[in-house]
Amino acid sequence: MATILDKARRTTPDVADTPETTGASGLIDPTAISRKTRSSSRVPRSAQRLLGPVLLVVAWQLTASSGLSGENVLPRPLSVLTAAWRLIANGELQEHMTISLLRVGNGLLIGIVLGLVLALVSGLSRVGENFVDANMEILRAVPNFALVPLLIVWFGISETPKVLLITLAVAVSIYINTFSAIRSVDAGLVEAARSFGVQRRELIRRVILPGALPGFLIGLRLALTGAWLSLIFAETINAKRGLGRMMSDAREYFQLDVVFVLIAVYAILGLLSIFIVRALEARLLTWRRSFDGN
């Protein structure tokens, strides 16, 4: 049996033994193996990810063409594209989208800063956790839409409640994931750093924050999704401009083609947000190797 196994090893090429996967010292470079596996496909990974949406559009076209549903129930993709072109040509879509992007941008900026500060206060100190954590858990448990009447009473129907609703959703997502990531940092690494005489400030900067970075990026991904969901609720607060206002008008006038255009806009904006976070992960987490589905 041993002789057979030896012959198999000599005759079977091993990817780990190729020059590309071995360094100058003769040791195997696992990152090179991963790169070679990913580069074996000629189709870019970004293009492969579009397979699901493409199949969804094909199924939509087949369903609309088969006559199973009328135009007043499920408009054809061509009708939706025509409506999108009309909204772009007259500038209506760009005008409403600009207002919504400003609201989301302001809410994201304030929410990320607020969530990070609260996560650091709570994650690095038990006293801070006693004051902050329970309140943030309560905010997470309360549906976002339930806060709309309260925000209207407090701040009226100006831009403040709209931005604040987005801010709260973003801050909660950032806080929950970052706080959990801080408390999940390997205690062995912390003890090892302390045994070498590392001071608290250096410990936080060199050990805890890098260890919590993956959790923060997960929170950022959820925060971006939550921001777009909160935007829909926020723009029900007497908004004269915005994608949510367009959606309300299209619903009232039963313009299904416009509704589908806005759904596609929300989907595209959400996908772009996810791609931005993935790019950040690829740049900031180069030191971390993880299973990528190979």
Image: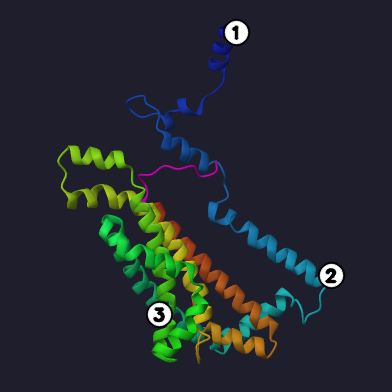
If you read the primary sequence from the N terminus, does the residue marked by circle 2 or circle 3 appear first? Answer: 2
- Total count of labels: 3
Q: Residue at x 46, y 41 (%)?
A: 35
Question: Which residue was labeled with disc 3?
Answer: 164
Q: Which mark is residue 66?
A: 2
Residue 27 shown in magenta:
no
Pointer 3: residues within 10 angstroms few (<14), some, or many (20+)?
many
Task: Indicate the secondary structure of the residue bearing disc 2.
Answer: loop
Q: Which mark is residue 1?
A: 1
Picture quadrant where residue 258 is located? bottom right
The amino acid on which the numbered mark 3 sits, given as a three-letter code, is Leu
Report how far apart the C-alphas of labels 3 and 1 lie in the structure: 71 Å
Residue 293 shown in magenta:
yes
Task: Indicate the secondary structure of the residue bearing disc 1.
Answer: loop
The amino acid on which the numbered mark 1 sits, given as a three-letter code, is Met
Closer to viewer: mark 2 or mark 3: 3
Q: Residue at x 59, y 53 (%)?
A: 48
Task: Indicate the secondary structure of the residue bearing disc 3.
Answer: helix
If you read the primary sequence from the N terminus, does the residue marked by circle 3 or circle 1 appear first? Answer: 1
Q: Which mark is residue 277?
A: none
The amino acid on which the numbered mark 2 sits, given as a three-letter code, is Ser
Q: Magenta region's main secondary structure?
A: loop
Magenta stretch, residue numbers: 285-294
Q: Which quadrant of the figure contains the N terminus?
A: top right
